[in-house]
Amino acid sequence: MRLTTLCYVERAGRYLMLHRIRKDQDENASKWIGIGGHLEENESPEECVRREALEEAGLTLTGLRLRGVITFILPAWGNELTFLYTASADREELPDCDEGVLRWVPVEQVTDLPLWEGDRVFLPLLRERQDCFSLKLIYDAEGRLLSYQLA
């Protein structure tokens, strides 16, 4: 099982979103997602998400908070355990990103973007809940959400 991080950075009522359009063989191709990535050897989830924010968006995160743990069951790509965070950013200016296009999107408009269906399950939880939750998302081989279990 792969270990990854995902962070929704908020600033002035907007989330930093990454439109994944620049990498070949990208399982997130054409989707909008938060920033994050795979844990490197001997790296904690917090170290990973801070490194990825700096690499992808040139941002130093403040107020980093673990909000959930998501188990992705993905037959086409392999299963993944993702540590879900929210944070604030030290600034608003964004660099070019090798993985896609970075944009600040009003929080209430994020679910209008092309997202993974499971993102539509957990994004509202970031606004509605203050606790750390556990979520299991089960997809089919074509990337369609079959079911989810929230704890």
Image (tube, rainbow, N blue to C red):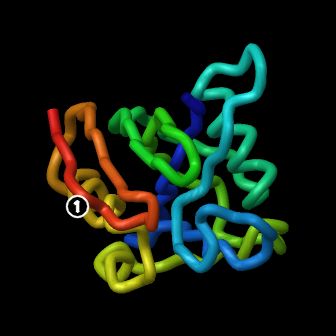
Question: Which residue sits furthest top?
Answer: 42
In the foreground, 136 or 126 = 136
Q: Is residue 118 left or right of residue 4?
A: left
Q: Is residue 122 above or below residue 133?
A: below
Residue 71 to residue 42: above or below: below
Image quadrant where residue 3 sits = top right
Where's the C terminus, which quadrant? top left
Quadrant assignment, res 118: bottom left
Residue 72 image point, x, y percent: 41, 43
- Residue occupying the point 37% across, 33% down: 69
- Find residue 62 and report its horizontal and vertical position in percent: 56, 42
Name above or below for residue 93 compared with residue 46. below
Q: Residue 2 appears at what percent x and percent y?
A: 59, 32
Give the side of residue 85 with respect to residue 134, left or right. right
Residue 105: x and y, percent? 47, 79
Query: Relative to the observer, which residue lies in front, 125 or 14?
Result: 125
* Residue for point 63% across, 20% down: 44
For the point 47% across and 48% down, the residue is: 75
Question: How busy is the neighbourhood of tag 1: few (under 14 within 10 Å), some, or many (20 plus)?
Answer: few
Q: Tag 1, which secondary structure?
A: helix
Name the residue tied to disc 1. Answer: 124
* Total residue callouts: 1
- Badge 1 amino acid: Pro
Q: Residue at x 34, y 85 (%)?
A: 112
Q: 138 left or right of 89?
A: left
